[in-house]
Image: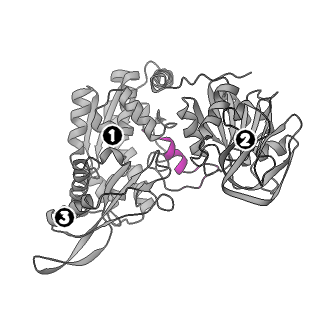
């Protein structure tokens, strides 16, 4: 019997899988997402205390329907199946799943038929979000139907003896207002978890794991950019390894204005880390010359980044490990067995195959808001804790088209103006990410009574919880007006300012 306070979420390709993970972690219970075809031995070795089967777009009776190893049902731990996860569990254990006569998409009402700890405290009826074309028509032996909707006779099922439960609706979305209570019932009433996963515990566990992996003599280098991800990774590794960690700050010429100076002051001055600053601006710009494809730019930067590291690390003597601030959304977006590649992250998909280091990625199972909590726990300066996310390839993916020194200088100034005005308006913390983009276009304008072709600056500003989805930020008009006035007045090359009103999806947060 496995008893670890860890949930493994088996991903069948559902659009809400990452949201399930977030909701579980909001209950201070640790969880990880694995693809449905993960070998049984690997899941067993992870020592989960419970499983959650996610939703998915497939039909269980389709020939290529995703299936998991049937031995997962023999682990002797609680299991919650959501939507497709409920259907695949029902079919695997001997129940029936058919195409629904009346498919359900959107808000519906769930009626509780039998009292059960999973749905405890919800009353006799509650609102839920449905999104399914199939449904369970007969529960497996040992199960009972515990809830229904107008169009779904088995909206929830339970096998109390084995601790197996199924929900046809989605408790993880905000459209199921009492969904968090349902997940809490599963985690605390049924799994008997205590909810003790905190950032303080994460620090202790991570330090122990890092020390074990690196060993008593191992040395590591960390790619320090000054953003929150690499900063947190660096401070965490410094606590674990002390002077056996050397941070390498590479100025690739693609940074925000004043970023290099802030990094040196914080990590040399405040944290007293071993820090090597490398001026590689000409190298990167030379390699980017003539390139316009976004994916190629990312990979060129990621590849050469490692080469610079290898070169600098050789000067340090023997170095065994490379530390990176990879986050969970980076891993997910770079492609898994159940998700297509959205974009290559330089710290996931752009690394050379013959890299000389072993990777340490202490944050790769954390979402961005969790990293901010971790940063505060590690006593990082407030300006770093709340700094907006910045892509690894830097301004190269915000200069659309070819990257040149002139375009970079212009974008640095434009971005500094944008951020300055947002901070003056007291809006910086309300916004997940805000930045300027320099598109590869010139448009006609008039300055000083003279016709001129000038650059357009695009403002991108979004709200989000973890970067997986995002909405554009509703700026007050007067703030947009101040930004526009400063851009076109302070920057002679600029004659136009526009604001991007696209959500993610269908857009991404970054333009490239």
- The answer to whether 414 is drawn above or below residue 6 in the figure is below
Provide the residue designation for mark 2.
81
Q: Is residue 56 visible?
A: yes
**Magenta residue span:** 325-341
Name the residue: 48% across, 40% down. 367
Q: Secondary structure at mark 1?
A: loop
Provide the residue designation for mark 3.
485
Of residue 326 and residue 252, the one placed in the foreground of this image is 326
For label 3, count other residues whose C-alpha is less than 10 Å away and answer few (under 14), some (14-19) or many (20+): some
Location of residue 216 by image quarter = top left
Nearer the viewer's eye, disc 1 or disc 3? Answer: 3
Q: Are marks 1 and 2 in contact (CB under 8 Å)?
A: no
Provide the residue designation for mark 1.
386
Location of residue 107 by image quarter = bottom right
Task: Tell me which label, 1 or 2, sits earlier in the chain.
Answer: 2
Total marks shown come to 3
**Please, which residue is most extreme toward the left here?**
448
Per the image, is 340 magenta?
A: yes
For label 1, count other residues whose C-alpha is less than 10 Å away and answer few (under 14), some (14-19) or many (20+): some
Task: Tell me which label, 2 or 3, sits earlier in the chain.
Answer: 2
Residue 194, position as x, y percentages in the image = 59, 22
- The answer to whether 14 is drawn above or below residue 119 in the figure is below
Of residue 68 and residue 405, the one placed in the foreground of this image is 68
Magenta portion: prevailing SS class: loop
For the C terminus, the quadrant is bottom left
Name the residue: 68% across, 26% down. 189
């Amino acid at each position: 019997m496995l008893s670890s306070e860890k949930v493994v979420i088996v991903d069948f390709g559902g659009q809400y899988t990452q949201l399930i993970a977030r909701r579980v972690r909001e209950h201070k219970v640790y969880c990880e997402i694995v693809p449905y075809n993960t070998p049984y031995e690997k899941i067993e070795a992870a020592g989960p205390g419970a499983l959650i089967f996610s939703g998915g777009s497939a039909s269980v009776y389709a020939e290529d329907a995703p299936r998991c190893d049937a031995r997962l049902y023999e682990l002797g731990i609680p299991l919650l199946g959501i939507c497709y996860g409920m259907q695949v569990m029902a079919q695997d254990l001997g129940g029936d799943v058919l195409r629904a006569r009346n498919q359900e998409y959107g808000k519906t009402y769930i009626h509780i038929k039998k009292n059960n700890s999973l749905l405890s405290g919800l009353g006799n009826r509650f609102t839920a979000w449905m999104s399914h074309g199939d449904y369970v028509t007969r529960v497996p032996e040992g199960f009972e139907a515990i809830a229904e909707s107008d169009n779904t006779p088995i909206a929830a099922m339970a096998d109390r003896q084995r601790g197996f439960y199924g929900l046809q609706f989605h408790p993880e979305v905000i459209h199921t207002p009492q969904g968090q209570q349902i997940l809490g019932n599963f985690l605390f009433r049924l799994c008997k978890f205590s909810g003790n996963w905190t950032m303080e515990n994460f620090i202790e566990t991570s330090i122990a794991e890092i020390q074990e992996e690196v060993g008593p003599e191992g040395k590591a280098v960390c790619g320090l950019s000054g953003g929150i991800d690499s900063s947190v990774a660096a401070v965490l590794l410094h606590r674990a390894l002390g002077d056996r960690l050397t941070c390498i700050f590479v100025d690739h010429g693609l940074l925000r204005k004043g970023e290099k100076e802030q990094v040196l002051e914080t990590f040399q001055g405040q944290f007293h880390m071993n820090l090597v600053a490398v001026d590689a601006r000409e190298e990167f710009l030379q390699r980017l010359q003539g390139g316009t494809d976004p994916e190629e730019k990312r990979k060129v930067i990621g590849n050469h980044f490692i080469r610079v590291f290898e070169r600098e690390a050789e000067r340090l003597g023997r170095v065994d490990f490379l530390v990176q601030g990879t986050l969970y959304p980076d891993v997910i977006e770079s492609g898994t067995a159940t998700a297509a590649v959205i974009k290559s992250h330089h710290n996931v998909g752009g690394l050379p195959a013959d890299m000389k280091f072993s990777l340490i990625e202490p944050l790769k199972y954390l979402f961005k808001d969790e990293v901010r909590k971790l940063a505060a726990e590690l006593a990082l300066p407030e300006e770093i804790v709340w700094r907006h996310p910045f892509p690894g390839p830097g301004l190269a993916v915000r200069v659309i088209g070819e990257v040149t020194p002139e375009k970079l200088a212009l974008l640095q100034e434009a971005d500094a103006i944008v951020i300055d005005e947002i901070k003056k308006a007291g809006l910086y913390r309300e916004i997940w990410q805000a930045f300027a983009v320099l598109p590869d276009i010139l448009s006609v304008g008039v300055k000083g009574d003279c016709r001129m072709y000038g650059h357009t600056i695009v403002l991108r500003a979004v709200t989000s919880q973890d970067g997986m989805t995002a909405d554009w930020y509703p700026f007050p008009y007067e703030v947009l007006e101040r930004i526009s006035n400063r851009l076109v007045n302070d920057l002679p090359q600029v004659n136009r300012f526009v604001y991007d009103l696209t959500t993610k999806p269908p857009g991404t947060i970054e333009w490239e």
